[in-house]
Image (spheres, helix red, strand yellow):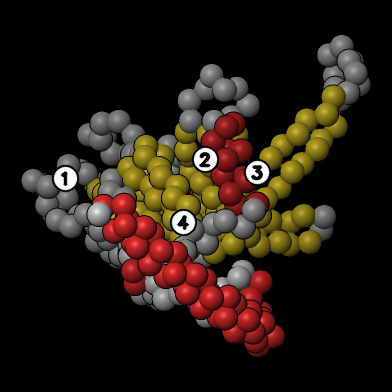
């Protein structure tokens, strides 16, 4: 396997800013001369945005091999579910990416383009949720008599509770998520120049494999952190809702402000609130016919009243 590295590495315990940090890593030329600034472990938060997502359901038949001494039992099926996201450094703000640090492997100036987040449920609910990182320097190897080249890459592995995983799987599968932000902090194996700020624009990655093997000075205590453990991780799923500017007022409308609706005449006739022309003519004719009767009744009443008055006068005398 041929690793594509351009520079060597060294640790020195007498850095330029001894009061700020006790040791640092340098990339060096073949003659040992440093080519860049001191690199020290970076403990602050780094941000990534998901650019694509793949949901995988895998069914696998597992059986013990007859070539081993293990007792052969019946084969069993295993179901493996994963959420795999392609990442890029930074977060989107006003249509542009910010906080987008440039990552590269120690020993090379190449910019890492391949970042992946793989999420899986814990196989044992009693285990603690965790996050780790793995990476590889670009290399060329022979596979089936053909040379294949693999690019620089960094993978994050996030293990979470089954119920949490099921919730995320449903949200993403139903298309209810518009963007995903993944952030990590205190990642062992991430280095950068010393800075009074809590942000950086360049990060170097130190791997745990043979590609980044180097000798430690006699006075160096411990081991330099290499890519592996992620001490803090956060996964944020966003859904954007467009709220209408012409939404109805939430306040109740007063009754006296509501204008009554104009109803058709046929509806008013049916309700007895309006008469037709025929009904109006009938009512008028009935009133004319009843007028003589009402006049005769008044005359009869007047004559009866006069008769009663005369009778009262005669009796009184």
| Tag 3 residue | 82
Q: Residues within 10 Å of mark 2 (few under 14, many from 20)?
A: many
Give me the disc on residue 286.
none
Q: Is residue 87 visible?
A: no
SS at badge 4: strand
Give me the disc on residue 158.
2
Residue 273 vs residue 87, the one in the foreground? 273
**Alpha carbon separation for disc pair 1 and 3:** 40 Å
SS at badge 2: strand
**Alpha carbon separation for disc pair 2 and 4:** 18 Å
- What residue is drawn where x is 54% and y is 19%? 126
| Tag 4 residue | 238
Q: Residues within 10 Å of mark 4 (few under 14, many from 20)?
A: few
Q: Which mark lies nearer to you, 2 or 4?
A: 4
Marks 1/3 in contact by CB < 8 Å: the verdict is no
- What residue is drawn where x is 83% and y is 14%? 70
Residue 79 vs residue 195, the one in the foreground? 79
- Dot placed on the residue nearer the N-terminal end, 3 or 2: 3
| Position above or below: 278 against 299 | below
Q: Position of residue 112 (x, y in %)?
A: 48, 63
**Alpha carbon separation for disc pair 3 and 2:** 10 Å
């Amino acid at each position: 396997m041929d690793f594509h590295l351009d520079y060597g590495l060294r640790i020195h315990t007498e850095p330029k800013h001894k009061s700020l940090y006790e040791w640092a890593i340098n990339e060096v030329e073949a003659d040992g001369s440093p080519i860049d600034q001191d690199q020290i472990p970076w403990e602050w938060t780094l941000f990534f945005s998901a650019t694509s997502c793949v949901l995988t359901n895998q069914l696998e038949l597992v059986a013990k091999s007859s070539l081993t001494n293990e007792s052969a039992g019946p084969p069993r099926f295993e179901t493996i579910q994963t959420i795999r996201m392609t990442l890029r450094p930074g977060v989107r703000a006003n249509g542009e990416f910010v906080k987008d640090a440039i990552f590269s492997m120690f020993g090379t100036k190449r910019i890492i383009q391949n970042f992946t987040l793989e999420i899986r449920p814990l196989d044992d609910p009693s285990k603690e949720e965790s996050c780790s990182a793995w990476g590889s320097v670009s290399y060329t190897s022979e596979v089936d008599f053909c040379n294949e080249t693999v690019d620089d890459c960094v993978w994050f592995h996030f293990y979470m509770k089954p119920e949490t995983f099921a919730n995320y799987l449903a949200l993403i599968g139903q298309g209810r998520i518009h963007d995903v932000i993944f952030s990590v902090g205190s990642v062992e194996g991430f280095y950068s120049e010393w800075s009074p700020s809590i942000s950086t624009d360049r990060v170097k990655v130190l791997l745990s494999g043979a590609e980044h093997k180097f000798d430690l000075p006699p006075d160096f205590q411990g081991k330099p952190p290499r890519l592996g453990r992620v001490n803090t991780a956060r996964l944020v799923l966003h859904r954007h809702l467009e709220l209408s500017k012409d939404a109805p007022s939430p306040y109740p409308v007063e009754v006296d402000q509501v204008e009554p609706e104009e109803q058709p005449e046929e509806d008013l006739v049916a309700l007895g609130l309006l008469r037709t022309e025929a009904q109006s003519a009938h009512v008028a004719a009935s009133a004319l016919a009843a007028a003589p009767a009402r006049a005769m009744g008044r005359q009869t009443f007047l004559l009866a009243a006069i008769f009663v008055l005369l009778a009262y006068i005669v009796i009184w005398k």
